Image: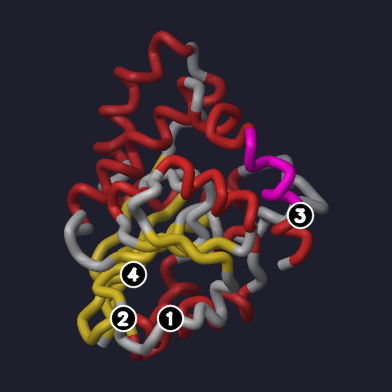
C-alpha cells in the first residue's frame, strides 16, 4: 500500500488534468458516469472508496483515500462533502453505515488476498441489501494482448468468476458491464465521441468480457 500511496501523492496536483483533462479521459469518464446513472442513486449515503481527487463525488456523500494529498485536492473541489484519510481494509466507519459504496481504478493495484479484505470491509459497513460497485481490468482482454507491462502496480486483472469466488455467498452479483471495448487511445480524437455510443452498446453484450475494464454491481445479502 505504501508504494501506491507514494505514487498518487506525487500525481495528486496534476492528476485531474493529466488523466481526465483530455479526450481519452473524457471518453472513460462518460462511460463510467453512464453506468452510475443506471446503477446508483445520487441521494443515498454513499462512500467513494479510494476516492482520489474526488472524481465522481457527485455520486457520493463521503470519500476515503490513503493519500492525504489526494484527499486535500478532493476537499478543495467538494468542501461540503466528508472526506477521511484511511485504509480501505480498515475504514473505521461504523457497521451498516452506507447504502452504497463504489470503488474505481483501485482493485487493479491490489493482490487478490487484499481485494478479498477490501470487499469484506465494504460488506461490514454496508446496510443489508446495500450496493457495491467495483471495476477491474478484464483478464480476457489482457489475455489477448501480446505485450504485458511488468513491474507496474496496476497489473491485477480479474474475471467475473474470480470476483464471485472472492465475494462468496455474502454477495449477489446483479449486473456487469464493460468499459472501453475499443482501443480508444489509437482512435483519432475527432472520432472518439461518436465511437463511444457504439462502445457503450457493445459493452452491454457478451463481448463486454473483452472490454478493457469490467464493472460489477454487487448487493450485500
Q: Give me the C-alpha separation between circle 3 and circle 2.
A: 29 Å
Check the image and report above or below for 142 versus 220.
above
Q: Which residues are magenta?
A: 6-13
Residue 94 locus on image (x, y percent): 39, 86
Left or right? Give the position of 69 relative to 175. Answer: right
Dot 2: element: loop
Dot 4: element: strand
Q: Give me the C-alpha separation between circle 2 and circle 1.
A: 7 Å
Question: Which numbered disc covers residue 93?
Answer: 1
Of mark 4 and mark 2, the one earlier in the sequence is: 2
Of mark 4 and mark 1, the one earlier in the sequence is: 1
Residue 50 locus on image (x, y percent): 52, 60
Whether residue 144 is visible, yes or no, is yes
Of mark 3 and mark 1, the one earlier in the sequence is: 3
Task: Name the mark nearer the viewer: 4 or 1.
Answer: 1
Residue 82 locus on image (x, y percent): 39, 61
How many numbered dots are placed on residues in this image? 4
Dot 3: element: helix
Task: Name the mark nearer the viewer: 4 or 2.
Answer: 2
For the view shown, which residue lies furthest in the right direction? 151
The residue indicated by pointer 4 is 132
The residue indicated by pointer 3 is 6
Q: Give me the C-alpha separation between circle 3 and circle 1.
A: 24 Å
Crowding at dot 3, Cα within 10 Å, few <14 / some 14-19 / many 20+, comes out as few
Residue 195: name its quadrant.
Answer: top left
Residue at 17% across / 59% down in the picture?
Answer: 43
Whether residue 178 is visible, yes or no, is no
Residue at 62% across / 77% down in the picture?
Answer: 114
Amino acid at each position: 500500500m505504501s508504494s501506491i500511496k507514494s505514487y498518487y501523492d506525487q500525481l495528486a496536483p496534476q492528476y485531474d488534468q493529466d488523466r481526465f483533462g483530455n479526450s481519452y479521459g473524457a471518453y472513460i469518464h462518460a462511460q463510467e458516469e453512464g453506468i452510475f446513472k443506471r446503477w446508483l442513486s445520487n441521494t443515498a449515503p454513499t462512500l467513494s472508496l479510494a476516492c482520489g481527487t474526488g472524481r465522481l463525488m457527485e455520486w457520493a456523500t463521503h470519500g476515503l483515500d490513503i493519500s492525504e494529498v489526494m484527499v486535500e485536492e478532493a476537499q478543495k473541489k467538494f468542501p461540503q462533502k466528508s472526506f477521511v484519510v484511511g485504509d480501505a481494509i480498515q475504514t473505521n466507519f461504523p457497521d451498516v453505515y452506507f447504502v452504497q459504496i463504489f470503488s474505481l481504478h483501485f482493485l487493479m493495484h491490489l493482490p487478490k488476498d487484499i481485494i478479498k479484505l477490501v470487499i469484506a470491509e465494504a460488506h461490514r459497513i454496508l446496510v443489508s441489501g446495500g450496493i457495491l460497485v467495483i471495476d477491474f481490468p478484464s483478464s480476457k482482454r489482457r489475455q489477448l494482448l501480446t505485450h504485458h507491462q511488468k513491474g507496474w502496480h496496476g497489473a491485477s486483472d480479474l474475471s467475473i468468476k474470480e470476483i464471485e469466488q472472492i465475494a462468496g455467498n455474502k454477495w449477489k452479483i446483479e449486473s456487469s458491464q464493460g468499459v472501453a471495448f475499443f482501443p480508444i487511445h489509437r482512435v483519432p480524437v475527432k472520432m472518439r465521441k461518436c465511437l463511444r455510443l457504439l462502445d457503450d452498446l457493445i459493452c452491454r453484450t457478451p463481448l463486454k468480457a473483452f472490454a478493457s475494464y469490467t464493472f460489477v454491481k454487487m448487493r450485500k445479502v
